[in-house]
Amino acid sequence: MTRRAPFIVIEGLDRSGKSTQTALLLQRMKATNIPAQLVKFPDRTTAIGQMINSYLQSDSDLDDRAIHLLFSANRWELASTIEQLLNSGISVVCDRYAFSGIAFSASKGLSYEWCRSPDISLPAPDLTLFLDISPEAAKERGGYGEERYEKEEMQRKVGEIFRRIGREISADGGKWVNIDAGREREAVAEEIWKWVEGVANGAVGPSRRLWTDKLPVDDS
Ligand code: DGP
């Protein structure tokens, strides 16, 4: 069976250093001659992404379900690009993915299962690294920014839901790693590198898809 490149997702709470760590990882992959491409969600450059951007900056208001579906649509519009990259031997490093979708929307009170539904069948990561940080440690890093979700109580709930998703992904045989992101930048980067090296040789066969066992039974 042909080999494809691994799909790596980095998730994290706001102020966890996620974007910095993603950039460091990409640099290190390139320096080690591992071809890799960054994909960032939300991708604010597309038409859907611009609606999301305007919502996050509180320039527009949207129903909680409507914005949830836009975030999901933003992932779907890049799903085939992700698969093409993997099949052509280029690793994809994704800054946020479907797990953010569930964690942030369910924190607002939407049902966990409802939030998961539109992301069922997206390409499944081979490795998900979750950068975990307490709201107290985030505060020490200068506190949260100006965007809509950057509030302490919200981040606490988001963290709880991320950890629940991680337990479920692991129970289903997926590779999910909780990383203590409250440490020094270099220590976090080293741990991330250790996990990435473990999958860097590529995966065999087509990528799996997320949560397909949660699809309703076809009774047609
Ligand atoms: P970032 O660009 O990584 O700072 O993400 C922007 C914000 O959007 C951040 O507070 C997390 C939130 N977010 C990211 N993905 C989703 C999603 O799929 N659904 C919801 N509701 N929020 C998301």
Image (cartoon, rainbow, N blue to C red):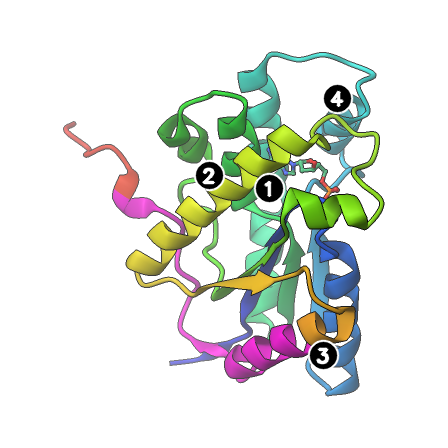
Ranked by sequence position, the earlier of labels 4 and 2 is: 4
Checking the image for residue 55, the label placed there is 4
- Quarter where residue 170 is shown: bottom left
- Viewer-proximal residue among 154 and 33: 154
- The 10 Å Cα crowd at callout 2, few under 14, some 14 to 19, many 20 or more, is many
Ranked by sequence position, the earlier of labels 1 and 2 is: 1
Ranked by sequence position, the earlier of labels 4 and 3 is: 3
Which residue is rendered at x = 66% and y = 61% of the image?
A: 181
Q: Circle 1 sits on which residue? A: 75
Q: Are marks 1 and 2 in contact (CB under 8 Å)?
A: yes
Q: Circle 3 sits on which residue? A: 29
- The 10 Å Cα crowd at callout 3, few under 14, some 14 to 19, many 20 or more, is some
Ranked by sequence position, the earlier of labels 3 and 2 is: 3
Ligand 1 - quadrant of the structure image: top right
Question: At label 1, which amino acid type do we have?
Answer: Arg
Q: CA distance from mark 3 to mark 1?
A: 24 Å
Quadrant of the rendering where the C terminus is positioned: top left
Which residue is rendered at x = 46% and y = 76% of the image?
A: 203
- Viewer-proximal residue among 207 and 192: 192
Ligand 1 under 8 Å from disc 4 Cβ: no
